[in-house]
Amino acid sequence: MVQAYILIQTEVGKAAAVAAEISGIPGVTQAEDVTGPYDVIVRAEARNVDELGKLVVAQIQAVEGITRTLTCPIVHI
């Protein structure tokens, strides 16, 4: 299982709607709108890195109002 944080920038005023829509996507375990350089932070999981990439590109980035994403896979050192 691969887990990651996905940091999302949105159009002005769209953070709450983006977080709400993303929270319903399978594989997303948490989606919160926040303040700072990013507008939404998502925690997601997938079976492997390829599946995580598909989740981000095909489903999360397709949500209207998103302008940029940064995916940060979780590592256990």
Image (cartoon, rainbow, N blue to C red):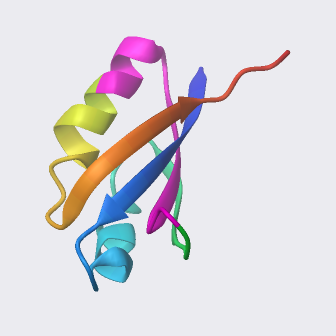
* Image point (47%, 14%), residue name: 48
Quadrant assignment for the C terminus: top right
Q: Does the magenta portion include 49?
A: yes
Above-or-below relation of 33 to 77: below
Above-or-below relation of 39 to 30: below
Q: Quadrant of residue 75?
A: top right
* Identity of the residue furthest to the bottom in this view: 13
* Image point (40%, 26%), residue name: 52
* Identity of the residue furthest to the right in this view: 77
Q: Nearer the viewer, residue 54 or 9?
A: 9
Above-or-below relation of 21 to 69: below
Q: Nearer the viewer, residue 23 or 76?
A: 76
* Image point (36%, 73%), residue name: 20
Above-or-below relation of 52 to 44: above
| 76 left or right, relative to 48 | right
Q: Nearer the viewer, residue 30 or 7?
A: 7
Q: Position of residue 1 (x, y in %)?
A: 59, 20
| 20 left or right, relative to 30 | left
Q: Does the magenta portion include 2?
A: no
Bounds of the magenta segment: 37-53
Q: Position of residue 4 (x, y in %)?
A: 56, 35
Q: Quadrant of residue 27?
A: top left
Q: Position of residue 37 (x, y in %)?
A: 49, 64
* Image point (26%, 80%), residue name: 12
| 1 left or right, relative to 6 | right
Q: Position of residue 8 (x, y in %)?
A: 39, 55
